[in-house]
Image (cartoon, rainbow, N blue to C red):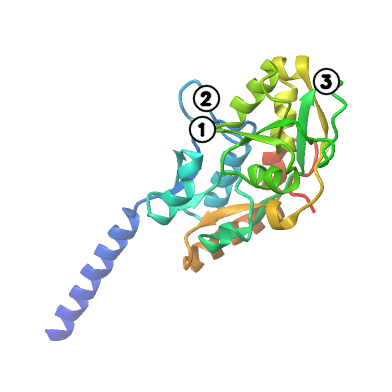
Amino acid sequence: MKTLISTLGLAVGMTIAALGGANADPLRVAVAAEPYPPFASPDASGNWTGWEVDLAKAVCKAEKLDCVITPVAWDGIIPALTSNKIDVIAASMSITPEREKTIDFSDKYYNTPTAIVAAKDSGYKPTPEGMSGKIIGVQVSTIHEDYVRKHFPDAEVRTYQTQDEANQDLVAGRIDATQADKIALDAFLESADGSACCESIGEVAPDVEVLGPGVGFGLRKGEDDLKAKLNAGIKAIREDGTYEAISKPYFNFDIYGG
């Protein structure tokens, strides 16, 4: 009888545990609430779409993780992670030593050069001398703000909540140039406003300390199991062709980088 009771108790316990696992909260994967095409933007229905959204969903699928895309304001995205309001950052966040003091990162899942855009025929160069005395617009709390402040000390830095705001001020002539990921700036230059007014003046000099070795998923320190799953998911979709299939509609080059 005791054996029967123990067996029944074990079975009930396993059933409850299984139900608990089935009803576990989904993994909250945060994108920046500010549109950043072609990586992440809301469509007309408010659903988030873009290359980085597709990639995050593919990694979750590969590792059988129940994930939900959650928009969070960029300047509060790390505090939202550390305070358990979200679980993963998937917002084109570069892996840098400064950020690694606060959060952990998965392996890189893409890398893109950093470029500067200015008015057509400006004659500017992406160098400290070429940017001296210029007004450079950057998105606040980004590696680009850090880079401009470090490498272009004689320029005036103007910060914006979104890259789109910086782009529009460039179109309006209120700033002289803007610095951001080359891919994002290429999308701007392909737009009606961007193609009419502006051009890339080139890529900036490398600085791994500031710009980092690439972009990874951000997660809380100590979550080694989740980190291992994200890394395995990145590896899996790169090996089975999913990464290439996701990237092809967006890019005509290898966004993974060297």
Query: Tag 3: residue type?
Result: Lys
| Label pair 2/1, CB-CB below 8 angstroms | yes
Q: Which residue is mark 2?
A: 43
For mark 3, give the secondary structure: loop
Q: Which residue is mark 3?
A: 120
Can residue 45 be seen here? The reply is yes
Identified at 51% across, 60% down, the residue is 102
Q: How many neighbours does mark 3 have within 10 angstroms: few (below 14), some (14-19), or many (20 or more)? A: some
Query: Tag 1: residue type?
Result: Trp
Residue 133 as seen in the image, left or right of residue 42: right
Location of the N terminus by quadrant is bottom left
Front residue (pair 164, 149): 149
Give x and y (percent) for residue 5. Answer: 14, 79
Q: Between marks 3 and 2, how big is the CA–CA gap?
A: 31 Å
Q: Nearer the viewer, mark 1 or mark 3?
A: 3
Identified at 73% across, 20% down, the residue is 194
Location of the C terminus by quadrant is bottom right
Residue 237 as seen in the image, left or right of residue 207: left
For mark 2, give the secondary structure: loop
Query: Tag 2: residue type?
Result: Asp
Give x and y (percent) for residue 236. Answer: 64, 57
Q: Earlier in the sequence, mark 2 or mark 1?
A: 2
For mark 1, give the secondary structure: strand
Give x and y (percent) for residue 50. Answer: 60, 34
Q: Between marks 1 and 3, how big is the CA–CA gap?
A: 33 Å
Could you say which quadrant of the image residue 39 lies in? top right
Q: Nearer the viewer, mark 3 or mark 2?
A: 3
Q: Which residue is mark 1?
A: 48
| Label pair 3/2, CB-CB below 8 angstroms | no
Front residue (pair 124, 171): 124
